[in-house]
Amino acid sequence: MTKPSKTPWPTKDAMQQVYAKNLWGGSETPFYSGAGSHDAATVQLYLEAVISFFKSLENPPVVCDLGCGDFNVGKELVPYTKAYKAVDIVPELIAHNNNTFKSKQLTFDTLDLAKDPLPKGDCALLRQVLQHLSNAEIASIVNKLYAFKYVILTEHLPDQEFIPNTDLISGQGIRLKKQSGVDVLAAPFNFKVKAAKQLLSLPAPGAKGKLVTNLYTVF
C-alpha cells in the first residue's frame, strides 16, 4: 500500500463529505458517485468506447483508474485488462470497494492524485475527476500523466464555446457554473501529447452541458 501524505488533505475532506452526505445523490447506497457513473445509457456508451480501445491494443493493458469512485463503471472494464489498479482519495470508499469487488487482476489503494506517486501502468483513466479539482492540483496530476502511454479523460463541459480552466476550490462543484471546463491541452496545463482523439460526447445526464471523453496518446 502507498504511504499516505503527511500534509493536510482539504480535497480528501471535501470528498469524504460528498459521500457521507450523499451530495451527488444515491441516498439508498453507502457510496454513490453521481449520475455520470449510474445513468445506464451514459455508462453503456462509455464502456463500449473504452472496451473497444482496449481490444484494439496488441495486449490487454495495465490500467490505472485514477479516481475510481464507487466502481460502478470500473468493474465492467476489469475483464479486458492485464491488471486494474483503482485508486481514490476517500479511504472509506476504498475499503468498501475492496470488500465488494473481487478479481485476481484488481487492486484498490487510497491515494491523493496530486500529492502521492501514481501507480504504474499503460493507460490512465480519469473520468469526471479533474473537474472537481483546483488548477494547482490538476497541474500536479498532469505532470505525472507523462508516465502513461495512453490517457482516457472524461470531463463535464459547457455546450457552447468556453474559456477553459477557470480556477476553483476543490470540492463537489465543477467549473460549469463559471461557464468553464477543464482542457488539459490548454494553458495553464499545456499537456503535450502525440495524438488526441475524441471517443465520445454525450449530454450530461440530469444536468446541463456534455460529457466528453478524449483519448490521448502520450508516447
Image: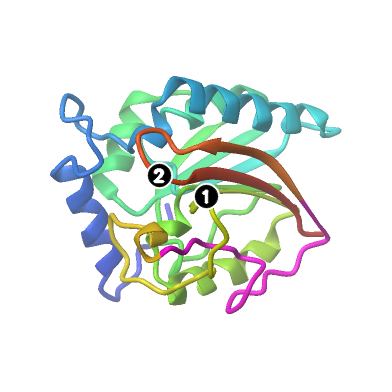
The residues bearing labels 2 and 1 have C-alpha atoms spaced at a distance of: 8 Å
Contact between marks 2 and 1 (CB within 8 A): the answer is yes
Could you say whether the residue bearing mark 1 is in a helix, strand or loop? loop
On the image, the x and y values in percent for residue 196 come to 77, 54
| Left or right position of 61 against 66 | right
Label 2: few (<14), some or many (≥20) within 10 Å?
Answer: some
Q: Which residues are magenta?
A: 179-196
Q: How is the image coloured?
A: rainbow
In the displayed structure, 51 sits above or below 194; it is: above
Q: Residue at x 54, y 22 (%)?
A: 44
Q: 120 or 179, which lies in front?
A: 179
Toward the right, the furthest residue is 58
Residue 10: name its quadrant. bottom left
Q: 31 or 153, which lies in front?
A: 153
On the image, the x and y values in percent for residue 195 come to 82, 56
- Determine which residue is flagged by label 2: 208
Which numbered disc, 2 or 1, marks the residue that appears first in the sequence? 1
Is 154 magenta? The answer is no
Could you say whether the residue bearing mark 2 is in a helix, strand or loop? loop
On the image, the x and y values in percent for residue 158 come to 49, 53
**Residue type of the residue flagged with mark 1:** Asp
- Determine which residue is flagged by label 1: 159
Residue 47: name its quadrant. top right
**Residue type of the residue flagged with mark 2:** Lys
